[in-house]
Image (spheres, helix red, strand yellow):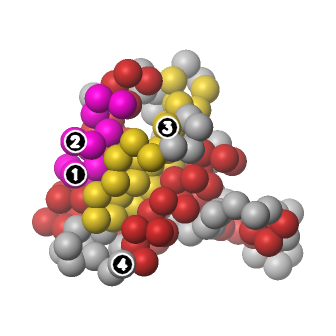
């Protein structure tokens, strides 16, 4: 399964909808992930400023999944791109190789983070941690679809 943006296109979401639906979408995405795939995850939803709107960690999810979901969301927001699309860029021969250490920011270049857009502008981000990177990416895409409703 490819984890590029083509498998989870960026969506347009009204900013008010993002705030109103963030908690429900986070819970729904975490529950759906746990039930459908048997994976316990954490889901983070950030606003355009990188502030926490919603967070949900399944009781069975590893503790670090909370941190990874938040860092994935932050990375997707700051670089305005799905984290799955950035993985290759930070490898030793990639153009962003030094970016993770050059910045004093909680960036994480592992699939599972997606920016959320409104009128072509980023208004937030979703991050999922706890499963395999491909799973986290798929779960984040499901949460994004939920927010776009």
Residue 132 in which image quadrant: bottom left
Q: Is residue 22 magenta?
A: yes
Mark 2 or 4, closer to the camera:
4
**Residue under label 2:** 24
State how far apart marks 4 and 1 are (Cα). Answer: 17 Å
| Total tally of numbered discs in the picture | 4
Q: Main secondary structure of the magenta part?
A: helix
**Residue under label 3:** 47
What's the mark number on residue 63?
A: 4
Q: Residue at x 46, y 33 (%)?
A: 11
Residue 23, percent from left and from top: 27, 43
Q: Is residue 26 magenta?
A: yes
The quarter of the picture where the N terminus appears is bottom left
Residue 53, percent from left and from top: 40, 42
Q: Is residue 73 visible?
A: yes
Q: Residues within 10 Å of mark 2 (few under 14, many from 20)?
A: some
Helix, strand or loop at disc 3? Answer: strand
Q: Residue at x 82, y 79 (%)?
A: 92
State how far apart marks 3 and 2 are (Cα). Answer: 15 Å
Dots 1 and 2: beta carbons under 8 Å? yes
- Out of 69 and 140, give the one closest to the viewer: 69
- Out of 8 and 30, give the one closest to the viewer: 30
Residue 87 in which image quadrant: bottom right
Residue 21, percent from left and from top: 28, 34
Stretch in magenta: 19-29
State how far apart marks 2 and 4 are (Cα). Answer: 21 Å
Helix, strand or loop at disc 4? Answer: loop
Q: Mark 3 or mark 4: which comes first in sequence? A: 3
**Residue under label 1:** 27
Classify 79 as above or below 30: above
């Amino acid at each position: 399964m490819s984890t590029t943006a083509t498998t989870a296109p960026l969506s347009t979401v009204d900013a008010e909808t993002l705030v109103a639906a963030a908690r429900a979408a986070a819970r729904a995405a975490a529950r759906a992930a746990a039930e459908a795939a048997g994976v316990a995850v954490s889901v983070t939803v950030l606003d355009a400023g990188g502030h926490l709107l919603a967070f949900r960690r399944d009781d069975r999810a590893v503790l670090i999944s909370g941190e990874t979901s938040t860092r994935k969301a932050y990375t997707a927001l700051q670089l305005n791109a799905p984290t799955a699309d950035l993985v290759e860029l930070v490898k030793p021969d990639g153009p962003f190789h030094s970016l993770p250490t050059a910045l004093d920011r909680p960036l994480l270049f592992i699939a599972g983070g997606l920016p959320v857009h409104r009128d072509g502008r980023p208004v937030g981000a979703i991050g999922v941690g706890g499963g395999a990177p491909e799973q986290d990416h798929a779960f984040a895409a499901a949460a994004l679809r939920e927010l776009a409703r």
